[in-house]
């Protein structure tokens, strides 16, 4: 199989310190420790539980059927709180005390970037869903794999939607973090390429403020006919309330994770008219249906657990790579990720099917529940489906589905 792969930093094996030797040099019959680091509270709180459940459900199934390389997987779960400082504390514990071989599941880009230096120093593989265009810059050792397209791809879709709806002048705001900063840059560039422009300067507010009245007043004062607010549900909700109270009647654009059930319940019919979008799973695909049934959901032709399905792919990709490499050594695992995820190879959608073919010496191509799971050379995802919606009657009504590059 021809492999596209990144070079592991020269001398990294020599650089492994005693803790790393312990991490990768355990007795071959001992458990393999893996960290599941998800947002169980904070801005990502609505989505962290579905990620954690996907990790746990797959691991329990794998362990019940002989484990990986005949070894049990010991999944250690921690909460990022959607906060980089809390995530760093949790990652430090996973790396130093639990001696994990990999950390999977981070959701917010600021969290993923926050723990990246720790993982790089300890040669710990990261598999995550993140969108900041800055993510590849922090991966100096080729240890990172992303199941989410970067903001540049999101913004092509969102800017195209704005122009299609007749809005070529839009003001931008978001929380002061890596994700929103990257989104602001990429959206401005995409909008300009389509012939539009950002009104005024993008501005970034502090999350968890007691009031967002000043931010709403600043946005209204721009006179922009449309606003794009790249926030999480915890900050977008109060910002939106203040915009409504302030009498703003223009078009609001945002991201789908900001306007889920929690938001709709909070603002009621005031949510109608908002346009939003995000990467979505391939509804109706066999691999997606297998994931849904595994976690106790019935396929219904609608998007369910948009981040849980990516977490299902995170854990399957990691475990298949370890099985393929016959090792938890990071260099071997990184090489194996490309081998099992990128074509060519016989299509598989579960760990069990992949393991059976690996044991026969057959090349495999893991096809995921969230996407085809094909990685670029830098570990970022090649492409994923996007869905664009309008809220009508408290429901998300699809406007357009496109496939965009990572």
Image (cartoon, helix red, strand yellow):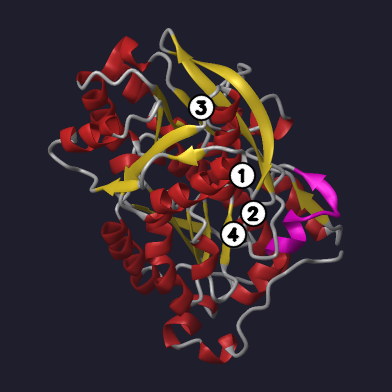
Residue at x-position 24% and y-position 32%: 216
Find residue 268 and report its horizontal and vertical position in percent: 30, 13
Residue 351 vertical position relative to residue 399 in the rendered view, above or below: below
Mark 2 or 4: in front is: 4
Residue at x-position 47% and y-position 58%: 74
Question: Which residues are drawn in magenta?
Answer: 337-348
Q: What is the count of numbered marks?
A: 4
Mark 4 to mark 3 CA distance (whole Å): 35 Å
The residue that label 4 is drawn on is 145
The residue that label 2 is drawn on is 317
Query: In which quadrant of the rendered image does the N terminus lie?
Result: bottom right
Q: Is residue 322 left or right of residue 24?
A: right
Find residue 258 and report its horizontal and vertical position in percent: 38, 32
Decide which of tag 1 and tag 4 comes sooner along the chain: 4
Mark 2 to mark 4 CA distance (whole Å): 10 Å
Mark 1 to mark 4 CA distance (whole Å): 29 Å
> Could you say which is closer to the camera, residue 268 or residue 214?
214
Find residue 233 and report its horizontal and vertical position in percent: 33, 33
The residue that label 1 is drawn on is 193
> Could you say which is closer to the camera, residue 16 or residue 210?
210
The residue that label 3 is drawn on is 167
Residue 177 vertical position relative to residue 8 in the rendered view, above or below: above
Residue at x-position 72% and y-position 42%: 349
Judging from the image, what secondary structure is the residue with disc 2 in?
Answer: helix
Whether residue 343 is in magenta: the answer is yes
Residue at x-position 47% and y-position 42%: 51
Mark 2 to mark 3 CA distance (whole Å): 40 Å
């Amino acid at each position: 199989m021809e492999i596209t792969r990144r070079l592991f930093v020269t001398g990294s094996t020599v650089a492994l310190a005693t803790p790393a030797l312990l991490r990768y040099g355990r007795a071959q019959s001992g458990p393999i420790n893996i960290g599941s680091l998800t947002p169980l509270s904070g801005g990502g709180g609505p989505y962290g539980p579905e990620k954690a459940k996907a990790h746990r459900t797959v691991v329990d199934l794998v362990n019940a059927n002989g484990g990986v390389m005949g070894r049990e997987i010991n999944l250690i779960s921690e909460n990022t709180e959607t906060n980089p400082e809390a995530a760093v504390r949790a990652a430090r514990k996973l790396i130093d005390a639990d001696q994990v071989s990999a950390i999977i599941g981070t959701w917010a880009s600021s969290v993923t970037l926050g723990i990246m230096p720790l993982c790089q120093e300890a040669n710990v593989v990261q598999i995550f869903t993140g969108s900041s265009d800055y993510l590849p810059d922090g991966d100096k050792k080729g240890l990172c794999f992303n199941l989410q397209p970067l903001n540049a791809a999101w913004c092509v879709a969102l800017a195209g939607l704005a122009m299609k709806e007749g809005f070529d002048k839009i003001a931008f705001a978001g929380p002061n973090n890596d994700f929103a900063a990257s989104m602001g840059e990429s959206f401005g560039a995409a909008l300009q390429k389509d012939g539009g422009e950002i009104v005024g300067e993008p501005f970034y507010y502090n999350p968890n403020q007691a009031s967002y009245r000043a931010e709403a007043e600043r946005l209204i004062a721009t006179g922009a006919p449309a606003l794009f607010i790249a926030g999480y549900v915890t900050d977008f909700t109060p910002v939106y309330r203040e915009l409504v109270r302030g009498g703003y009647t223009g078009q609001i654009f945002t991201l789908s994770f900001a306007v889920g059930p929690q938001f709709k319940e909070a603002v009621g019919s005031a949510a109608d008219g908002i346009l939003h979008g995000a990467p979505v799973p391939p509804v109706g695909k066999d691999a997606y249906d297998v994931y849904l049934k595994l976690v106790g959901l019935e396929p219904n032709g609608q998007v369910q657990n948009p981040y849980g399905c990516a977490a299902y792919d995170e854990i399957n990709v990691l475990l298949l790579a370890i099985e393929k490499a016959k090792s938890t050594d990071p260099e071997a695992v990184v090489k194996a990720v490309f081998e099992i995820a990128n074509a060519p190879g016989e299509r598989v959608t579960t760990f069990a099917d992949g393991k059976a073919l690996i044991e026969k010496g057959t090349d495999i191509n893991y096809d995921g529940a969230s996407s085809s799971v094909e990685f670029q050379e830098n570990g970022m995802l090649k492409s994923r489906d996007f869905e664009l919606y309008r809220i009508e009657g408290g429901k998300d009504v699809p406007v357009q589905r496109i496939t965009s590059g990572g």
